[in-house]
Image (tube, coloured by chain):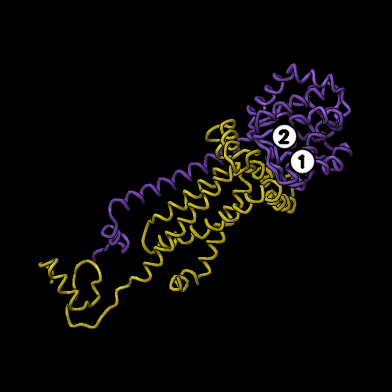
Chain colours: A purple, B yellow
Amino acid sequence: MSRSRPRWKRRRSNRYGDSRSRFRTWSWVAAGLAGAVLIGALVASNLGGSAAPVSREDRVLGSATAPVTVIEYGDFKCPFCTRFHVQTESQLRSRYVDTGLIRFVWRDFPNIDTESRIVAEAGRCAQAQGAFWQFHDAAYEFIWNTYYGQGVNVEGRPAYSGHLDELARQASLNVEQFRSCRDHGTYQDAVNQELQSGQSRGVRGTPTFFVGDQRVVGAQPFEVFSQLIDSQLPRP
Amino acid sequence: MNQLMTDSAFRSPRWWASAIGAATGLFLLQVWLPNLGTIWSVTSSSSMSLGEKVAFLWASIGALDTSFSVPAAWLVVAISILFGLNLALTITLFRRHGPMTAGGAGAAGVAAALLGVGCSSCGAVVLSVLVGTTASASLMAFLPLGGIELDLLAVIVLGFGLYLSIRRLSSSESCTIQPVQSSHPPTGLGFGEDLELPDSVRSYIHLRDPDGP
């Protein structure tokens, strides 16, 4: 008994021309490319990385002896950092920072546009006057209330321009010193170094967090952070 | 289309199970892709109970609401559904006719969707792997819709793949040879050996293939 070819093999050789055949080949090349892209992403996302240890130059909120450290690589122009600040950070502060369970650390990762760097440097100038967190909160509340909370995207467009002095006043800063600090670009190199340090440690966008030894990308819900923090707290 | 909807494939629970399974799989992949390392670490952790792990995974799906813009979230859902239908139809076509072009179109759509996973600020995960963080952020900021264009492209490509698959399935269902009663012997031309053809067709075959029966 002779084995006959499958029906589809017999038919397709006659019914389709060379152009169909080429298209089919390219389709499978596309499928292979999709697979390669997927594998590359999976490998890259599993590379992990870790944040640099907390130093005296870092902007830290909470007890230095807290058992878990949460580090945020953020950008004052990033809409999802803003959303995280409004929706999640306040809950983290009241439940974990205020109770001494975590310390929350800010690192600059200005990657949205050129204004991102300007505001990051302004944050450093506020830090020099001991009021980084007041400036941080004022900046995020300003951009949320004025733009992102209203559904207006200002990525790549000026948003803080002409408002930084006003934010400095809200943060109870010495505005003259603040302006001078910014005009001289005092912290330009420091901001660039922190950006490069984040990149070298696997940060690819903002917001990126390190909850203890776990990297969390994106403005995840509060429950994701609480689960990760709770799992790393000392068990009674 | 009516003929298509009465196709046996669509009445099969397995067909729907594969479509829903594929759609769910791609949906979770798109939501979880930026944090696959952490998800793997948590699910394989011995310090968390099964309940805590399930709660973590469930909570992380909430990123669709907090980590995606509204249009991007809808596009994630649309891409997942289109992919599920594409894959199930491709499998059906593969079983009936062999490798099909629609499968490649579907795969290209998934590739486009994965390129855009993330957002302009969170970083397009796959794209940043391919072209680097700075170039990816620049490209996303340059695009007027902040990277949603890639998801729209994915919807178009997947929609085209779905159209190809449906057209192929529909045509294969409607172009059937109707057997007729005849006393002539089988044609022996390599197909339809067991069919009896009308005289007009048989005389045409004789003209084209004089060595035939």
Residue A87 is drawn in which quadrant? top right
Q: CA distance from mark 2 to mark 1?
A: 9 Å
**Residue type at the position of mark 1:** Thr
Can residue A207 be seen here?
A: no
Residue at image mark 2: A159
Q: Are labels 2 and 1 on one chain?
A: yes
Provide the secondary structure element on which disc 2 rests: loop
Q: Nearer the viewer, residue B181 or A120?
A: A120
Q: Which mark is residue B48?
A: none
Residue shown at 65%/39% (left/top)? B122
Q: Secondary structure at mark 1?
A: helix
**Where's residue A198, x and y in %?**
67, 28
Per the rendering, the mark at residue A146 is 1
Question: What's the amino acid at mark 2?
Answer: Ala
In this rendering, the count of numbered labels is: 2
In x, y percent, where is residue B54? 71, 53
